[in-house]
Image (cartoon, helix red, strand yellow):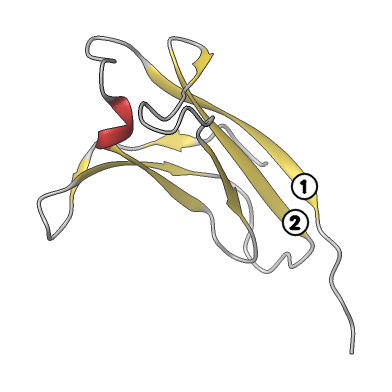
């Protein structure tokens, strides 16, 4: 990454859903690089309140922004949302 990730302000999308964006600061056009984004609340890994799974998302190609849906924050009012980002070295298949 070239700088810290940017956590944006909540966004309201067309169907009245709210989501929180996170943009990874890294140049586009790097096909062998990916990122694993682990969402956190008060520094602890966020867990889906229904499924019990850790909230981890992957960015590949030129994708640099991922979103956290507000429904995953049930029971987290008044806490600080953040994330950990790991870079991944991807293998590009040549045909």
Mark 1, other Cα within 10 Å: few <14 / some 14–19 / many ≥20: some
In the image, taking residue 72 as reference, residue 66 lies left or right, namely right
Q: Secondary structure at mark 1?
A: strand
Residue at 22% of width from left, 14% of height from top? Answer: 77
Q: Is residue 73 left or right of residue 56?
A: left
Residue 41, disc: none
- Is 77 situated left or right of 65 in this image? left
Residue shown at 17%/48% (left/top)? 17
Q: Position of residue 27 (x, y in %)?
A: 64, 57
Q: Which residue is mark 2?
A: 33
Residue at position x 26%, y 16% from top? 75
Identify the image quadrant of the N terminus: top right
Image x and y of residue 95, in percent? 89, 90
Q: Is residue 46 left or right of residue 90?
A: left
Q: Is there a contact, CB below 8 Å, between mark 1 and mark 2?
A: yes
Could you tell me which residue is drawn at 79 percent across and 62 percent down?
A: 32
Indicate the position of residue 71 as horizontal and vertical percent values: 26, 35
Residues 80 and 24: in front is: 80
Outermost residue, front side: 51
Question: Which residue carries the number 1 mark?
Answer: 88
Cα separation between marks 1 and 2:
6 Å
Q: Of label 1 and label 2, which has the lower sequence position?
A: 2
Element type where label 2 sits in the image: strand
């Amino acid at each position: 990454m070239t700088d810290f990730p940017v956590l944006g302000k909540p966004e309201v999308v067309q169907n009245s859903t709210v989501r929180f964006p996170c943009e990874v600061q890294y140049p586009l056009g790097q096909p062998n690089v990916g990122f694993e984004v682990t969402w956190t609340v008060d520094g602890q890994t966020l867990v889906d309140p229904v499924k019990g799974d850790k909230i981890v998302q992957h960015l590949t190609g030129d994708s640099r922004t991922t979103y956290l849906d507000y429904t995953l924050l049930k029971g987290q009012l008044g806490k600080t949302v953040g994330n950990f980002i790991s870079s991944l070295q991807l293998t590009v298949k040549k045909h």
